[in-house]
Image (cartoon, rainbow, N blue to C red):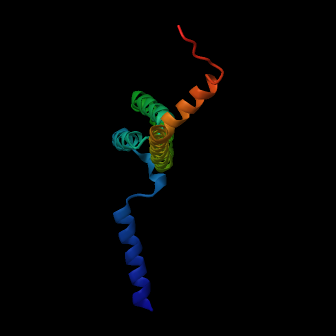
Amino acid sequence: MRRLVEGIILAAMLAVVVLGPPAFAHASATSDQLLASAQSTYLKILEAQQAGGNVTSLTDTMNQALALIGEGQSVEGSDPATAAGLYQQAGSLIQEVNQQLPQVESAGRAAEQAELLWLGAFLVSITAVGGLVYLFGSRVFWNVWVRLHRGWVVKKA
């Protein structure tokens, strides 16, 4: 039993080391750490955009986070407490964007699939209409022409 408890504690410690610090560690994050996190998040945003997602709100939120980091850097020497608060707000914005990224990317992929489906349906319908016109077009044309000109009489000149 004791070995089991030791194994669980060892696994938990290993998980903390491997997975990194907990989410509340952003409160003491430096501007360099936040900028690195923002850069990786921007790369993820680019991937989501390439997948067809609408990333406008995400980039706006990231721009707000970068503005907060810039403000924190400008006041870091004179007021470290305010800078830490600004860094914390920026970190929470970056986390918010990271949480929204999978949903935006999947929505983009779904939109692309729907667009491909509509394109396929359109091409099939155009092909079907073309085939029907090829098969029955001349018959329909001449039947309509005969009905329209039924009362015409040809006179000798």
The answer to whether residue 94 shows anywhere in this view is no
Residue 33 position, x and y percent, is 35, 44
Q: Front-most of 125 and 65?
A: 125
Q: In the figure, 12 relative to 122: above or below?
A: below
Q: Which residue is drawn at 39% across and 82% down?
A: 7
The percent coordinates of residue 78 (x first, y second) are 43, 29
- Residue 121 appears at what percent x and percent y? 49, 44
Question: What residue appears at the point 40 percent right and 58 percent down from the top-left corner?
Answer: 21
Give the vertical position of 52 relative to 99 (above or below): above
* Residue shown at 48% from the left, 40% from the top: 122
Rendered view: 139 above or below 145:
below
Q: In which quarter of the image is the N terminus?
A: bottom left
Residue at the far top: name it.
157
Q: Is residue 149 visible?
A: yes
Q: Is residue 147 rendered to the left or right of residue 76? A: right
In this image, 31 relative to 114: left or right? left
Frontmost residue, 114 versus 128: 128
Q: Which of 105 and 57 is in front in this view?
A: 105
